[in-house]
């Protein structure tokens, strides 16, 4: 199971495949209306469930904020055939583990993006490993015409972006800080939207 895997367990396999390259992750133009709705929804979550930047939050609370960013992204992309699925089970004959993606974005029978949500202390140790494994499962399951698939690991404050291609795994990261939350969250949405449009 992916949920049992840590970065240390897979580092020897995945580290040589990782290519840090932010040029693979451009920013799209997005409508201000959708971004404003997302920011209002994030404010409502903070008011009702606690400040997202508090270290005391449960993973389920973090997941609600990440889901709101993903929802805004799908609305901003304005592509009717995109779907957001929660708790998507993934398995492949070509990858030895199975797992459950917290979120999955698909277009028809092709998965475009898998998302793993973790609390801050588990993001690099577990979330990164799970996202990479689910990325490989998805890449092998996608139709032959799919050139790449994206993976995300996030604790809402930190966003790790991965792009799996036949040649390797490109990656970069972004952050959402408390003082600049609105601008940072919009930038993350713009990056996610461009990923889904590619």
Image (cartoon, grey):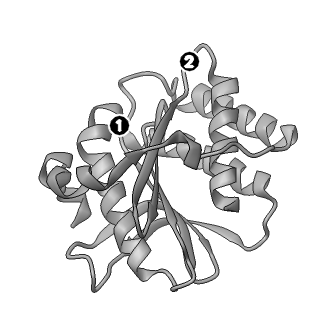
- Residue nearest the viewer, comparing 137 with 55: 137
Element marked by disc 2: loop
Q: Residue at 22% across / 72% down in the picture?
A: 97
Q: Which of the image's four quarters has the N terminus?
A: bottom left
Q: Residues within 10 Å of mark 1 (few under 14, many from 20)?
A: many
**Does 93 sit left or right of 142 as displayed?**
left
Q: If the image is split into quadrants, where does the C terminus sit?
A: bottom right
Q: In this view of the protein, can residue 125 be seen by the observer? A: yes
Which x, y percent locates residue 153? 41, 47
Q: Nearer the viewer, residue 24 or 137?
A: 24
* Residue nearer the viewer, 25 or 40: 25
Residue 165 place in picture, x, y as percent? 45, 65
Looking at the image, which residue is at 38% across and 48% down? 19
Tell me the residue that label 1 is attached to.
Answer: 119
Give the SS element for disc 1. loop
Residue at image location 48% in from the left, 23% down from the top = 53
User: How many numbered discs, if any?
Assistant: 2
Residue 34 has which mark? none
Q: Residue furthest front?
A: 167
Q: Is residue 158 above or below residue 12?
A: above
Residue 3 placement, left or right of 136: left
Regarding residue 160, the answer to whether it shows in the image is no
How crowded pointer 2 is (Cα within 10 Å; few <14, some 14-19, many 20+) is rated as few
Q: Is the Cβ of the residue at disc 2 closer than 8 Å to that at disc 1?
A: no
| Residue that numbered label 2 is attached to | 178
- Looking at the image, residue 114 lies above or below residue 194: below
Is 186 situated left or right of 31 in this image? left
Residue 70's spot in the image, x, y percent?
62, 51
Please report whichever mark, 2 or 1, sits nearer to the chain's N-terminal start: 1
* Residue at 47% over, 40% down: 172
With respect to residue 122, does 112 lie above or below?
A: below
Marks 2 and 1, Cα distance to the nearest angstrom? 16 Å
């Amino acid at each position: 199971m992916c949920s049992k895997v840590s970065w240390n367990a897979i580092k020897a396999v995945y580290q040589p495949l990782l290519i840090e390259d932010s040029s693979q992750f451009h920013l799209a133009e997005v409508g201000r209306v959708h971004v404003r709705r997302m920011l209002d929804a994030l404010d409502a979550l903070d008011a009702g469930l606690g400040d997202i930047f508090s270290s005391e939050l449960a993973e389920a609370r973090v997941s609600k904020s990440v889901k709101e960013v993903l929802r805004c992204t799908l609305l901003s992309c304005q592509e009717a055939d995109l779907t957001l699925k929660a708790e998507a089970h993934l398995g492949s004959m070509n990858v030895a583990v199975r797992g459950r993606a917290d979120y999955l974005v698909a277009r028809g029978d092709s998965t475009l993006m898998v998302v793993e949500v973790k609390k801050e202390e588990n993001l690099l140790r577990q979330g990164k490993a799970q996202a990479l494994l689910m990325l490989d499962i998805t890449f092998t399951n996608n139709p032959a015409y799919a050139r790449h698939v994206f993976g995300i690991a996030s604790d809402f404050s930190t966003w790790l972006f991965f792009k799996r291609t036949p040649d390797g795994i490109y990656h970069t990261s972004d952050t959402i800080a408390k003082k600049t939350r609105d601008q940072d969250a919009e930038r993350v949405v713009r990056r996610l939207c461009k990923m889904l449009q590619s």
